[in-house]
Image (cartoon, grey):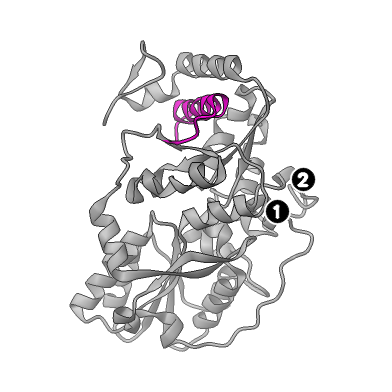
Amino acid sequence: MRSETIHENVTMRYIDEYRNPKHVSTLARLIAENTCHDYSLMEVCGGHSAAIRRFGIPSLLPSRVRLLSGPGCPVCVTATAFIDKAIACSALPGTIIASYGDMIRVPGSTSSLEKEKSKGADVRIVLSAHEALGIALQNPEKNIIFLAIGFETTAPGTAVTVLQAKKDHTSNFFVLCAHKTMPPAMEAILAGGTRLDGFICPGHVAAVTGSGIFDFIPAKYGAGCVVSGFEPVDILMSILMLVKQVNSKKLSVEIQYKRAVTVSGNSIARSKMNDVFEECDSEWRGLGIIGSGGLRLREQYSEFDADLCFPVKTESRSENNSCICAEILRGLKRPPDCRLFSSACSPETPAGACMVSAEGSCNAWYRYRTAI
């Protein structure tokens, strides 16, 4: 693990140092000293959204530094139509749905995978695509459909699993794909009129892709970018770096999370992902259809494509008009602005996708309200 510095006199190598109250106080003071006007900064990673609330980061910042949560939670941006299709597939005879845990609670048009499971559908929670492939090998008489969601962080894992299934001639493993790519969504937010001075860029995505995927943002949209880690010192340091970028008007892509991220990223992970997937237009909950905002299986892997192999019919309905998840995901509103927040909508009874996952902005605001 590489060391990082707060300033020339402080070097950090261990996790507890990234939570050191002295370092946190120093960074909070430096941010306050450098704040000279209003700043709107958006994180686009569910891990950052949760960490910002968990560690009470907003309470350490000047009022002129405003943090907004963007579409960084993969569960939150998965479209209703995808959930409806997964539910329809769960009703097919001899079918097992393999899903990440949070996904089964996301509301579709009329039901959820959790509700269908309670009615008898075979829906199993897995931690990876590889685990889903294992279920396929253990149940050769069943069709296993893995719900592939997530950004560039999880897509390589799905790709490696598909390659393994291809190599082993596994005929009962399928992928219903809703993988997303982050840069087009960030561009859609800026092009859609959300006013931002900078992005706290997703560290896990950039560990795979490299920080270079964000280079177009300062050049084309005049917003700064800092790839951040997930500890309090990481986040505060990233905010300070963005504030200094805005003050100097020298907007760029910087890497705060140098212990995990490089400019070029992980070439092996990128290669596997590019071998198996190709870019496609994709529907994002709250953002609509984003050009090149998703991934789909290439033609040579079509035998694993659940979309092609199981052409079920669904009729998706419009989402709850009282829920403002769409505006929250675009950075136009905050969770407390929703009249359902903490009353009709809670982690136990989520009315919208942003409340379901631990990485959802509404869920994080709800769980860490005392830290806000």
Q: Residue at position x 43%, y 85% from top?
A: 308
Residue in the foreground of this view, choosing between 34 and 330: 34
Q: Is residue 166 magenta?
A: no
Q: Residue at position x 62%, y 20% from top?
A: 35
- Which amino acid lies under the numbered mark 2 shown in the image of this protein? Asp
Residue 249 vs 346, above or below: the answer is: above
Element type at marker 1? Answer: helix
Residue 35 vs 340, above or below: the answer is: above
Task: Work out which quarter of the rendered image holds the C terminus and state it.
Answer: top right
For mark 2, what is the residue? 337
Q: Residue at position x 54%, y 48% from top?
A: 359
Write the start and end of the magenta stretch as one range. Answer: 229-253
For mark 1, what is the residue? 327
Q: Residue furthest left?
A: 167
Q: Position of residue 128 (x, y in %)?
A: 36, 61
Q: Earlier in the sequence, mark 2 or mark 1?
A: 1
